[in-house]
Image (cartoon, rainbow, N blue to C red):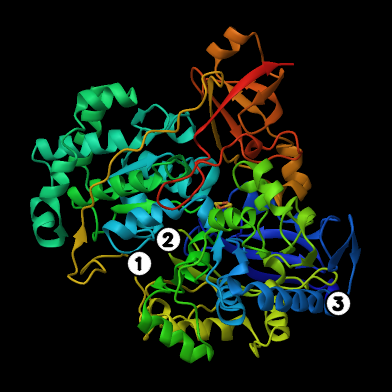
Amino acid sequence: LRATRTKKTKTVCTFCGVGCTFEVWTKGRKVLKIEPTPDAPVNGISTCVKGKFGWDFVNSEDRLTKPLIRKGDEFHEATWDEALNLIASKFKEIKERDGADAFGFISSSKCTNEENYLLQKLARSVIGTNNIDNCSRYCQSPATTGLFRTVGYGGDAGTIYDMAGAGLGIIVGANPAEAHPVIATRLKRARKVNGRKLIVADLRKNEMAERSDLFLRPAPGTDHVWLSAVTKYIIDQGWHDVAFLHNRVNGFEEYKKSIEKYTLDYAEKTTRIPQEQLIETAKMIHEADGTAIFWAMGVTQHCGASETSTAISNLLLVTGNFGRPNAGAFPLRGHNNVQGACDFGTLPNFYPGYELVTDDDVRERYEKAWGVALSPEKGLDNEGMLNAINKGELKAMFLMGEDMAWVDANSNHVQSTLEKLEFFVVQDVFFTKTAQFADVILPASPSLEKEGTFTNTERRIQRLYQALEPLGESRPDWQILIELANRLGGDWSYASPAEVMAESASLAPLFAGVSYERLEGFSSLLWPVQADGTDTPLLYTESFPFPDGKARLTPTDWIPPVQMPEEYDLFLNNGRLLEHFHEGNMTNKSKGIMHKAPDTFVEISPELAKERGVKDGSLVRLQSEYGAVKLRVVVTDRVQGKEIYVPMNSTSEISAVNLLTSSHSDATTNTPAYKEAKVKMQVL
Ligand code: SF4
């Protein structure tokens, strides 16, 4: 009888970092509909196509429903006891023989805050290593670094209301109309109804560029240059915020000197942006009642990504655009829980709440709470772990909810590296490409089948409630981690994710007042959260989180894009498609979504199409130094000249864009430079 009753359950969308919440109507296992409500703090009654129609993947026949153990080249179904006991015994054997740092743990922004907390605790307190990272390494680490350097917190400066309320919004290397649709809707409405201004800087004439007041089209990898030139021009005109700089910021004179070379002339030559447009940009910032800058992978997936992110923050500091409403820095998080995965400690250098593993006082606090000695050494990030596998130093890996064989850059290299692991555990909802390299595969439950919290791009922590029972024998990640920790001697007794959050709040000052009671229903909290439950929608109103309370203008220099052999004559850009979630590992299982967007393609410009004699629907082979793909052509003026664009989702092994991308990475964070790829094209 229970199975046939219709019920409504509040959940948080998992398809992007906007963090829309709504009620999901279910009957048995059937998802009947998504019902947005005015109570939702971020989206109100809005959703996008993914949030509304992308949920039938939960009943896909492709779901993993039983643990699998490799025997030779095949996988065999196993009981949970068999699978977990095998993992525990192999982990013990490898730890005894090679030590704790022979392990690597990778978490996912698709998993909850509590699951991220537990995985880092498993790595640190049960195994004894800080070799833990999450998929934010692939996207947002440089943005976080740029903000840590300058303003002290790595998160968005304010809320979605500040984004839409800014007198001027500048979107750099982001495509919110497809990647963050509800934010895009608010920005569009703010411009149309409230007269806010919008500048878009992008290689591709995306929808937001079409709707902007000014469209800047820089040469690939040159955002740092035009941002610095605009900042210099503002200072030269005396348009900088003298009082703000004097009272709240350190390092102005040194910074001013560091950008002397970024003249308008130099910037125009380097970026191809006409000087008039650079002057117009500076003027619009000067005249705006608050400037907010939004950026994403078009900035962060370059070799100089941390430097460019720093340049963005510097520009906002020079113009006094921090610590006031409707202004500030807004890195747009891609996955639903990029922010939370990092917040809750699945990083090689930070405990939850961004406290350093190398800080003796912090480490002692965790040692006391967890009852074990902890490693004082910073661990390896994703790239470091792959290098360590290739050197034979890292023997075992535990990967939760991430398809790194497709989403990491230079897939062929990643896949051949994973083959070298002595023991590899993959915990996921589907039998992913990465799972093919595993020794044990554990079936996990997606968000509708569990409780927990996610933190969206604004730093807003929100609860999701369980709408469905786990399919087959699949289990929520948090339950699996507890079972595994206990088999490895962990003595964990959490009865619910609420208890995990309570422990985290007791240890990490950033979340001191976070509790499930305060997050009941559609309630939410934006960190930092004081012990009395006071949260922080707007950062930096009083001070910046540095010892003297002042922000730090940080000189940086432009790192030009990597040079590649001349035979690869086309610049390859890539990004999201509205209908799909990243590489598509959930939305590819949704019939409605697949009907609308069945596969990927390559966009090429009309001029390139003419030169190469291709038209819409032509089949081409793209080849880089690292691999090759075959794709159908879409001719469009969204791209220009020899710049081409491939969406990152794919359904087949011959069209995945990361077969083409390289292993070059951001100099500071090791985030892959996905946006610095070149290919040659052959018409088939
Ligand atoms: Fe989900 Fe993002 Fe769409 Fe909102 S905007 S419904 S969070 S995919």
Nearer to us: label 1 or label 3: 3
Earlier in the chain: of badge 1 and badge 3, it is 3
The N terminus - image quarter: bottom right
Disc 1 to disc 3, how far (Cα)?
A: 47 Å
At 69% from the left and 70% from the top, the residue drawn is 8
Q: Is residue 593 above or below residue 327?
A: above
Q: At label 1, which amino acid type do we have?
A: Pro
Q: Is residue 545 left or right of residue 577?
A: left
Q: Is residue 110 visible?
A: yes
At 18% from the left and 48% from the top, the residue drawn is 318
Q: Is residue 263 left or right of residue 221?
A: left
Where does residue 260 sit, x and y in percent of width and height? 15, 36
Q: Is residue 567 above or below residue 280?
A: above
Where does residue 11 sit, x and y in percent of width and height? 62, 67
Earlier in the chain: of badge 2 and badge 3, it is 3
Q: Is residue 520 left or right of residue 156?
A: right
Observer-nearest of 133 and 61: 133
Q: Is residue 46 visible?
A: no
| Residue that badge 2 annotates | 458
Tally the marks. 3
Badge 3 element: helix
Disc 2 to disc 3, how far (Cα)?
A: 42 Å
The answer to whether mark 2 and mark 1 are in CB contact below 8 A is: yes
| Residue that badge 3 annotates | 82
